[in-house]
Image: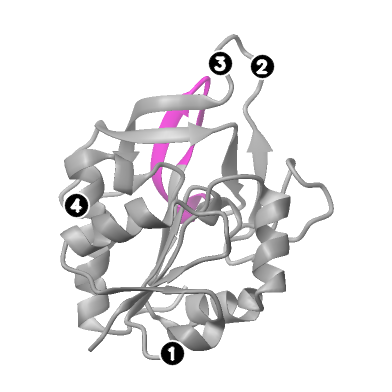
Amino acid sequence: MSFVALIDYGMGNLMSVSKALEFVGATVRIVEKPGEADGASGVVLPGVGAFGDGMERLNSAGMVPFLKKTAASGLPFLGICLGMQMLLDSSEEAPGVPGLSIFPGKVVRFPELGEKIPQIGWNSIVPDENNPFLKGIPKDSFFYFVHSYYAKPDDPSCVAARCTYMVEFAAAVGRGSVFASQFHPEKSQDCGLTILKNFVNLCAKGISEPC
């Protein structure tokens, strides 16, 4: 039986993500080592916390080569929150700590422009209508965010959704079989479940265009 591999490196809200994936039809296997993901139809990298700690734990678990290989393989790959930020090269939160470099770019802190940092709560996005992970998501749909830092990809074409909180930023990035969101789809009610369902449907179809 095919399954979605949910990466456990000690910094993700695994239960809520797992339950949301199961609700939309996925069989979920929580994995702590790369070998436990053998045969997966898709991979999810969740995350809550600091960039440096997240990368340290992924390295300690031997997950970094596996995640890079997965992103290049065409297997559907979903990153969530910190799991999105770590797909870039680096972060201002942890100077000198390399990310996964799946999307060239950096993660930067929100500027001090009068609003509260972190951004916590609901905000609307402008999605790329052509991205298969965002199928059925109307413009200005609301999603749930909790973050002080945001991704700033070098290539604007990989921005899959935009959002504004003091500045316009990438609410999601995507290319080929890889998609990652700064917001939490598992906490974003029907719109979030739609994205998870799109991911599960892509998993069912098999390997697609690699990142």
| Dot placed on the residue nearer the N-terminal end, 4 or 2 | 2
Residue neighbourhood size for the residue with mark 3, other residues' Cα within 10 Å, grouped as few (<14), some (14–19), many (≥20)? few
Which residue, given by chain and number where applicable, does mark 1 sit on? 38
Q: CA distance from mark 3 to mark 2?
A: 8 Å
Q: Nearer the viewer, mark 4 or mark 1?
A: 1
- Kindly report the secondary structure that dominates the magenta region of the rendered protein: strand
Residue 112: image tag: 2
Which residue, given by chain and number where applicable, does mark 3 sit on? 116
Residue neighbourhood size for the residue with mark 2, other residues' Cα within 10 Å, grouped as few (<14), some (14–19), many (≥20)? few
Q: CA distance from mark 4 to mark 1?
A: 26 Å
Query: Residue at the spot x=60%, y=45% of the render?
Result: 49
Query: Residue at the spot x=47%, y=85% of the render?
Result: 36
Give the residue type that dot 2 points to: Glu
Q: Which residues are magenta?
A: 156-170
| Dot placed on the residue nearer the N-terminal end, 1 or 2 | 1
Residue 10: image tag: none
Which residue, given by chain and number where applicable, does mark 4 sit on? 194
Q: Residue furthest right?
A: 96
| Dot placed on the residue nearer the N-terminal end, 4 or 3 | 3
Q: Is residue 37 left or right of residue 144?
A: right
Q: CB under 8 Å between callouts 4 and 2?
A: no
62, 77: nearer the viewer: 62
Query: Residue at the spot x=26%, y=85% of the render?
Result: 2
Element on which disc 1 rests: loop
Q: CB under 8 Å between callouts 4 and 1?
A: no
